[in-house]
Image (cartoon, rainbow, N blue to C red):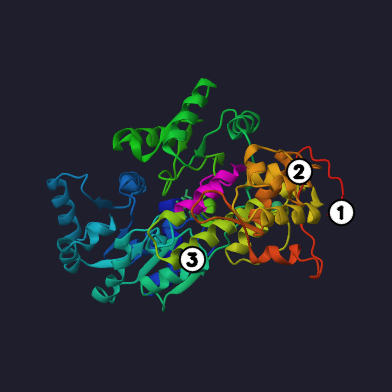
Amino acid sequence: MQRAQNILKSTFGYENFRHHQADIITALIDGNDVLTLMPTGGGKSICYQIPALIRAGCGIVISPLIALMQDQVDAMTQLGIRAAFLNSTLSPSAQRDIEAQLLAGELDLLYLAPERLLNSATLSLLDRTEIALFAIDEAHCVSQWGHDFRKEYQQLCMLHERFPAVPRIALTATADARTRSEIIEQLALDHASLFVNSFDRPNIHYAISESGNSREELWRFIEENHPDDAGIIYCQTRKSVDTISQWLNTKGRTALPYHAGLGQESRQENQQRFLREDGLIIVATIAFGMGIDKPDVRFVAHMNLPKNIEAYYQETGRAGRDGKPADAWMSYGLRDVVGLRLFTENSDAEEKFKRVMHQKTDAMLGLCELTSCRRIALLTYFGETTNQPCGNCDNCMNPPQTWDATIATQKALSCVYRTGERYGAQYVIDVLTGKSSERIERSSHDKLSTFDIGHEHTAIEWRGIFRQLIAHGYLATDAEGYGVLKLTQKAWPLLKKSETPQTVMLRGLHKAKVKKKKL
Ligand code: ADP
Ligand code: ZN
């Protein structure tokens, strides 16, 4: 272990190991398999780099990030580590050179994409090579639930059959229990030592709001908090990436777009500029970010609801890797929720898979709608127990007003029920607020007992109430995505007055004057 300590100092220039680094390194040097879950910026690379330097042979690093291999190898080379990568961006003769170096024992680390590793020529090359260890980076790519799924990752279990004496380390910054057990199962890591770091990123300030005009709010947030800082803005569609990046440029900020429609070359160029220049904003779809190592990203903004909490955590985790204060800011709308549900429903996935996806959307929405500490909820989601409010999230710093919305909820639910669970929020709100129309009259909904019983709130306030009732699971939107509201199991006790009374507390409404009125 003294050797590891020496290398940490002489090669990397660090005094002490962080977190579980020392234990992980010892386990690998001793020839054991390891699974490590560490947040982005936690220091995963050293966990396999140092053992690869200490054990005889070359460490093979499996990574899906071909675009970043050059940078990773350059960084290693600067430290005096003999590193290389093999992929199709190299000329055939350059590839042959590297293969020769590998066979001659002249490499400490070799980076490969999984598809390259699995090809039979590479495997037979490795058969003839002394291998120090296999490092399976971004191991969550084995998970079919995640958006980084790579089917080749699922074949990596063959490594331990073909090279039983070579220790393996799987690394990821994704930590929910389901992904973790999938990694263990798919990569046959049941005997591996497990090292789980706290996923808390105390320097990140979390703020989430539901918004009508998120672009203006985004601008206010950037102008007030990050007038010159580098940041990432995530948008759902390529089109919104383009419009928002152009718009920020008109506001005087340098903002670069990044999405799959841009072509490899300009994507690469924008990414490089973002990494190398100061104070740039990248506006991107989720295609951007995996493996990006820019320590001074001061904010990550989401213009839509991310697909699930894992994605939110991973994307926001790209802020503040240097440990200095950073912001995770999100503005989302009800449309996003409907959009995500629709996306899942329209996919040709199995029912079981869709159910999990819906649950994940609901959990994400739950985090947004929360009125208590966001960090506690986030860490709890990842299986960490903590109940100390963090003091560094919007809810801790400005506790949201809540109000007893039981009566409003009963009115809303019974109006959905009386109109036959066949309409979207807008129609139901028109009935509630007594806004007659030809359509309403045709269905005689102006004769319903619930017609105009909700006039104490404006239509805008009702929208907020319905959104929260969906978030809290009292109402669901139809699977086809037309926005038709349906009552859920959870709604019935509120409709049937005989049941034990139940209160519904909701987030305060903007400009709402809440008059109490009996149903
Ligand atoms: P990850 O892959 O987990 O996101 P990295 O391996 O890129 O993280 O490490 C993040 C940063 O922390 C890097 O700049 C790395 O050099 C630095 N780092 C890693 N281990 C230590 C340590 N023991 N002491 C100080 N800095 C460290
Ligand atoms: Zn908090």
**Amino acid at dot 1:** Lys
Q: Which residues are magenta?
A: 314-343
Residue 14 can be seen, yes or no: no
**Amino acid at dot 3:** Ala
Q: Position of residue 320 (x, y in %)?
A: 56, 44
In which quadrant will I find the N terminus?
A: bottom left
Instruction: Please identify, in this view, whether the residue under mark 1 or under mark 2 is nearer the observer.
Output: 1
In front of the other: 241 or 442: 442
Mark 1 or mark 3, earlier in chain: 3
Q: Which mark is residue 22?
A: 3
In front of the other: 291 or 22: 291
Q: Which mark is residue 518?
A: 1
Query: The residue tagged with tag 3: helix, strand or loop?
Result: helix
Q: Which residue is mark 2?
A: 509
Instruction: Please identify, in this view, whether the residue under mark 1 or under mark 3 is nearer the observer.
Output: 1
Q: Which mark is residue 182?
A: none
Left or right: 418 as drawn, with respect to 290: right
Q: How many other residues sit within 10 Å of disc 1, few (<14), some (14-19) or many (≥20)?
A: few
Residue that sits furthest to the bottom in the current view = 191
- 340 inside magenta stretch: yes
At horizontal 87% and vertical 49% (from top left) the residue drawn is 516
Instruction: Please identify, in this view, whether the residue under mark 3 or under mark 2 is nearer the observer.
Output: 2
Asked where in the image residue 56 lies, by quadrant, the reply is: bottom left
